Image: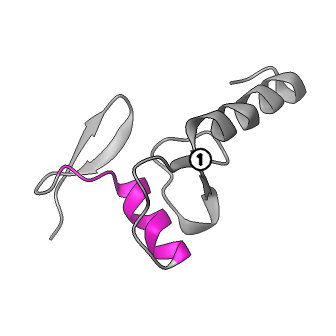
Amino acid sequence: MARFKFKRGYKYFKNSGLSVARYVAGRKIGRPLKKTERVHHINRDKTDNRRCNLDVYKNQREHTKTHRKDKKNTGLW
């Protein structure tokens, strides 16, 4: 049974230190994520790691663009 730890609100596998979101997103796209790729939680809930709630961006810059757009539309980062 997997054990988890939390860091800055994100869930990690205790045995490997791997982010659950990065693991699930990698499974979703069919390959491990590159170090530069970033995972975005669509509903902004860091603990919601369902495949349908995760998007993968090629880098932090693209990910930040989405957050800025969200903030403009909703007022929330």
Is 19 a magenta residue? yes
In the image, is 36 to the left or to the right of 18? right
Residue at left offset 37%, top offset 63%: 23
Q: Position of residue 31 (x, y in %)?
A: 44, 75
Camera-side residue of 19 and 48: 19
* Amino acid at the residue labelled 1: His
Q: Position of residue 40 (x, y in %)?
A: 59, 46
10 Å crowding of disc 1: few (<14), some (14-19), many (20+): some
Dot 1 corresponds to which residue? 41
In the image, is 12 to the left or to the right of 25? left
Q: Residue farthest to the right?
A: 73
Q: Position of residue 10 (x, y in %)?
A: 38, 40
In the rendered view, tell whether residue 45 sits above or below residue 76: below
Give the secondary structure at mark 1.
strand
In the image, is 67 to the left or to the right of 23? right
- Which span is picked out in magenta? 17-29
